[in-house]
Image (cartoon, helix red, strand yellow):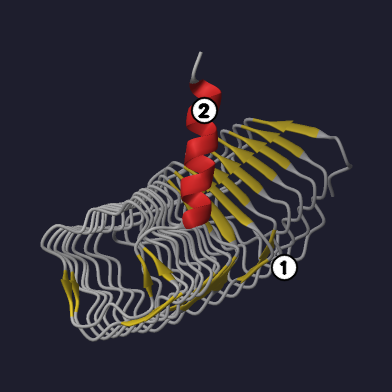
Amino acid sequence: MVQRGDEIREKNLKGLNFRGFDLSGGIFLSCDFSGADLSGAKLEGGMFNQCRFADANLASAVLVECVFSRCEAPGARMPGASLDGVMFESCNLAGVDFSGADMGHASFADDVLDDASFADVRLEKLSVHGGSLRRVDFSRVLVRATFFRTDLRSAVFTGCSYDKTIFIESKLTGQVFRGQSFENCQFTDADLRDADFEGATLLRCNFKGAQLEGSSLRRVRALQSLFPQVHMKGVACTGGVFTQSIWIDADLEGVDFAGADLEQCVFHRARCGKASFSESTLTYADFSYADLHDADFGGATFMRTKMHRALTEGTRFSDRGGLLPNDPDLFAAEEFSARGARP
């Protein structure tokens, strides 16, 4: 038995049987648990610094509020473990099996998680900062997580859904999210080139500054989502529902919005040259100051659709009924501003 606060230093504990033992609160420094059986053990509140857990068995162990720093644990098994509040910092967790674990508010910073499995884990809020996540598996997880500057290009997200998930400055190039559900998620400055969101639900999501070239947003439901300053040249958004979404300063050159619902969308200063809005719904949409050169609005539905000071050279319309080429209120505001700027 270990008393809370006991310090255990440089012990060789390889292959030993600690099944069901209570080691709560222990401080372990440079100890070797490689191949040890810690299944069902209670390690709550423990601190592990530069310890080894290679191929150790921690199935159903209680690791609540534990701190692991600079530990080596490749191939360790933790299925069904209790990990709420656990912190892993600069650890080697390659190939670790966390499947089915209760992770609660777990935190990972600069860890190696290559080939690790988080399949079927339960999360309240997972935090991942940097590190390596090659081929990490999040299958069938309700992802409530923050990924900061994380490379997730080869991660597996099969059968996932996402709630308040944050992917800040993360790499998701080529990921397949087809038909999945995202709600209140953040993709700020993320790399989403060639990603497949076809048929996905993207409610109230934020894509500010994201790179989406080559991606597919066909038939998405992206109501009240934010796309300011996105890079989306040539992206297919056909048949999507983008009601009340924001596209201020977005690069939408050549984007295909054919048949999309863009009601009450705001495209201020967006670059929409050669984009297609054919057969789209643009009721109360606002293209003020947008670049619409050579864009196609054939068959589009307009109702109080604003194009105040928009560039429309070469733009194609089958019917201009419902268009407001100049907004009198904006004109008045511009005049007032100009008068105030005069000496």
Q: Quadrant of residue 196?
A: bottom left
In the image, residue 154 above or below residue 101: above
Which of the numbered marks, if any, corresponds to residue 169? Answer: none
Q: Nearer the viewer, residue 152 or 38?
A: 152
Q: Residue 91, can we see it? A: no
Q: Secondary structure at mark 1?
A: loop
Of circles 1 and 2, the one toward us is 2
Tell me residue 263's x, y (percent): 45, 77
Mark 1 in CB contact with mark 2 (< 8 angstroms): no
Q: Residue 329, can we see it? A: yes
From the viewer's perspective, is 84 left or right of 205? right
Which of the numbered marks, if any, corresponds to residue 339? Answer: 2
Under mark 1, the amino acid is: Gly
Q: Quadrant of residue 122?
A: bottom right
From the viewer's perspective, is 238 left or right of 296? right
Q: Residues within 10 Å of mark 1 (few under 14, many from 20)?
A: many
Please count the marks in the image: 2
Tell me residue 142's x, y (percent): 57, 74
Q: Nearer the viewer, residue 318 or 227?
A: 318
Under mark 2, the amino acid is: Arg
Which of the numbered marks, if any, corresponds to residue 40? Answer: 1
Which residue corresponds to the image point at 33% horizontal and 81% vertical from the top-left? 321
Tell me residue 7's x, y (percent): 78, 31
Q: In the current view of this chain or complex, which residue is farthest to the right?
A: 3
Tell me residue 65's x, y (percent): 76, 49
Q: CA distance from mark 1 to mark 2?
A: 76 Å
Q: Nearer the viewer, residue 28 or 224?
A: 224
